[in-house]
């Protein structure tokens, strides 16, 4: 039973990251998994419930990954964020924030709250990483760390989208420039 639930969430995650939240239905999950729609509704009565579960899993992965790195130098920690986006790039996907953001105004309020929470957690972590790294001389940038974190995150999000349109090399060009701008691309 748990395996079915995890498979449903995993496929929903892939569909959101490849098509977008509003562009898939339970049928897009039930057919490839060879289960009935009723099985999906058993675990997730509404699509909102399913979307929230996908975000929860993403948040768990993010927290587990960053937690493992807490003792590492900040340049290594930031590399984790870049590697996470690189993995999505190699899979031909966009990240969850990048996929849900265009649909944000059409999402149910509980789902909006979840994506806002995920976004805030990623911004807070990135801000802290950049500020601590700058204090240790690992990064060089002017201005507030929170503003730089917004630039890093927005550029990483955009790099996945632009690489779909402009070719896969765009991702590497953007990420390498971001690291150089931080003084971390040595």
Image: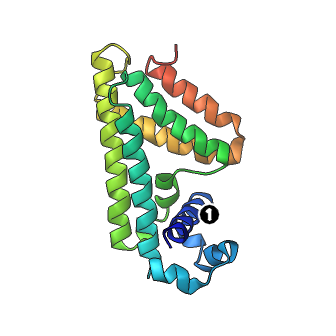
Q: Which residue is drawn at the image coordinates 43% and 29% (left, top)? A: 78
Give the residue at the far bottom of this rendering: 38
Q: Is residue 39 left or right of residue 150?
A: right
User: Quarter of the image holding residue 26?
Assistant: bottom right
130 relative to 63, above or below:
above
152 relative to 88, above or below:
above
Q: Which residue is drawn at the image coordinates 46% and 18% (left, top)? A: 184
Give the image location of residue 158, x and y in percent.
Answer: 54, 44
Q: Is residue 172 left or right of residue 140?
A: right
Give the residue at the far front of this rendering: 1
Give the image location of residue 136, x and y in percent.
Answer: 30, 15
Count of marks placed on residues = 1
Give the image location of residue 137, x and y in percent.
Answer: 33, 13
SS assignment at label 1:
loop
- Name the image colouring: rainbow
Q: Which residue is drawn at the image coordinates 37% and 50% (left, top)? A: 119
Q: Nearer the viewer, residue 107 or 166?
A: 107
165 relative to 132, above or below:
below
**Whether residue 104 is visible:** no
Give the image location of residue 161, x and y in percent.
Answer: 60, 48
Q: Residues within 10 Å of mark 1 (few under 14, many from 20)?
A: some
Q: Which residue is drawn at the image coordinates 70% and 39% (left, top)? A: 168
User: Quarter of the image holding residue 14?
Assistant: bottom right
**Whether residue 186 is visible:** yes
Residue under circle 1? 19
């Amino acid at each position: 039973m748990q395996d079915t639930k995890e498979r449903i969430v995993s496929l929903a995650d892939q569909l959101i990251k490849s098509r977008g939240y509003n562009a898939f239905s339970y049928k897009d999950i039930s057919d490839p998994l060879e289960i009935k729609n009723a099985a999906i509704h058993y675990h997730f009565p509404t699509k909102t419930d399913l979307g929230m579960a996908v975000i929860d899993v993403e948040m768990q992965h993010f927290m587990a990954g960053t937690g493992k790195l807490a003792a590492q130098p900040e340049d290594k920690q930031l590399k984790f964020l870049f590697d996470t986006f690189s993995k999505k790039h190699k899979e031909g996907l966009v990240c969850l924030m990048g996929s849900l953001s265009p649909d944000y105004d059409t999402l149910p309020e509980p789902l909006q709250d979840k994506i806002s929470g995920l976004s805030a957690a990623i911004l807070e972590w990135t801000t802290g990483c950049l500020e601590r790294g700058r204090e240790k001389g690992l990064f060089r940038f002017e201005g507030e760390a929170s503003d730089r974190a917004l630039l890093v995150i927005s550029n990483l999000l955009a790099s996945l989208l632009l690489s779909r349109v402009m070719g896969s090399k765009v991702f590497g060009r953007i990420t390498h420039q971001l690291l150089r701008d931080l003084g971390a691309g040595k």
